[in-house]
Amino acid sequence: MAQPHPALHLALALDGAGWHPAAWREPDARPGELFTAGYWTDLVTEAERGLLDFVTIEDSLSLQSADPSAPDDRTDQVRGRLDAVLIAARVAPLTRHIGLLPTAVVTHTEPFHLSKAIATLDYVSGGRAGVRVKVSARADEAAHFGRRTLPPFSFADLAAPEVQALVTELFDEARDYVEVVRRLWDSWEDDAEIRDAATGRFIDRDKLHYIDFQGAKFSVKGPSITPRPPQGQPIVAALAHDTVPYRLVARAADLGFVTPRDAAQAGAQLAAIRAEQAAAGRDGETVHVLGDLVVFLDDAPGAAAARKARLDEVAGAEFASDAHVFTGTPGELADLLQDWARAGLSGFRLRPATVPHDLEQVTRRLVPELQRRGAFRTSYQGGTLRGLLGLPRPANRYAAAAATAGATH
C-alpha cells in the first residue's frame, strides 16, 4: 500500500483586511473593526479551527504603501496598524494550540526589549510564541528614530554595489540581533527560580548569567529580567528572497519563508538555504522552509480569477506580489502544494487575498481536502509550537557551560 505524502506544515499570514489592496471594500470585510482586539481574535481563532500550525501578523515602522521602498499618498487603501506583538499577546489567552508569530522590525529596535516581549508572549500563550524578524532599509523608517541615516533607493537599484553592501550590513546586524535575543532567553537557567518562602530564596543568583555580547552594533551585558521562556527558545522566523536573507535564515532562524514561482524554483531556493546552513555549521539542525503564496480561493472553477479581476478593477491596477499569486479552487491549490512539497519544502504560509473569505476557504475547504489526502493533521499534537513543528526544546547554553566548567574542577 502506498504511503501518504508526509504531512505539511501550514500557516497563515495575516495583514489587515487581506493582501489585496481592495480587500477592505468587499461586502464581508470589517474595515471598521481593523483596530479592535475582537477582529484579530476572530481571525486567529478561525485559523485554529483549521488546525493550522501558526499565524504570522504583519507589522512595519511606516504606513503601508503601494511603493515598497517609500511612502505614498494614497487614501483609498488601508493605512495604519496595531502593534503585532501586542495583538499576539491579546489573542494568546483566547487560543489554545496555534502558534503566534508577530513581525518585529529589528533594524531600529533593541534586542533586549524584543527578547523580553517574546518571552512574555511565550508565557502568556503557554509555549506557542515566536517572532518573524524583519529588516528595514527604508530611509523614511530610519527618520522616525534619528539614530542613523539610510540612503533612499528603489528596488531597481538593488544590484548596485553600494546597495548590496548596505543590505549585507543590515542583515548581518539582524543576525547579531537574533543572537543577542537567543542569549538573553538562555540567560536564566530553567531552574533559576526557587520560590521557597520558608528560606526566603526566590531565585538562585548563580543560575542567572551575563551574556556579555559585543558586536558591531550591539553591546549587551544581560541577564534578561524575564525567566527562560517555556519553550526555552521561542521560534525565530524570517522571510528570504535572495542570498543575503537566505544566509540569515540559515544562520539564525528556525523557520524561513521563501517565494518560489514553481516547484523547480522552490528546490533551488531550498538548496541555497541548505548550502548556507551547512556553511554555518548547522547542517545537523532542522530549519523548516515554507513557501509563501497569496491565495484567491473559490469552489467554482474560474470564480477566484474573476474575483481577483474585479478587485483589480476596484483598485485601479493589477495585483502583484513578491509571492506567487494563486487563483483557483481549494482542490487545485492542494495539488500545487503537494507538487511543490516534493521539492523539499516543509510546508506553506498562505496569504489570504481577502478576509474573511479566503481565510475561511483555507480553513474550511483546503484543510479538509488535504486531510482527505493524508497530507495534513486531523488534530493538534505537541503542546508547544516547537512540538507542533517537530523541533526539540534546546538545552540552555549557559547551564551546559556551567556544568562543563564544574566537571573540570
Image (cartoon, rainbow, N blue to C red):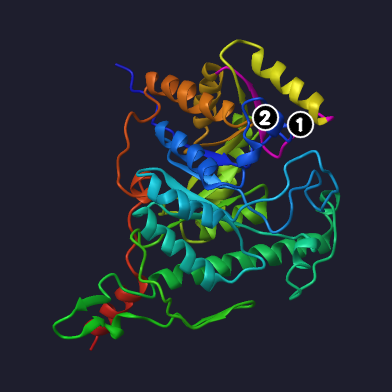
Identity, as a three-letter code, of the amino acid under mark 2: Val
- Dividing the image into 4 quarters, which one contains the C terminus? bottom left
Residue 231 sits in quarter:
bottom left
In x, y percent, where is residue 225? Answer: 41, 76
- Dividing the image into 4 quarters, which one contains the N terminus? top left
Front-most of residues 288 and 109: 109
Q: Which residue is mark 2?
A: 325
* Residue drawn at point x = 79 percent, y = 68 percent: 143
In x, y percent, where is residue 285? Answer: 41, 54
Q: Specify the segment rendered in magenta.
A: 316-329
Front-most of residues 237 and 251: 237
Magenta span: predominant SS is loop
Magenta span includes 48: no
Name of the residue lying farthest toward the left: 198
In x, y percent, where is residue 379? Answer: 31, 32
Residue 4 sits in quarter:
top left
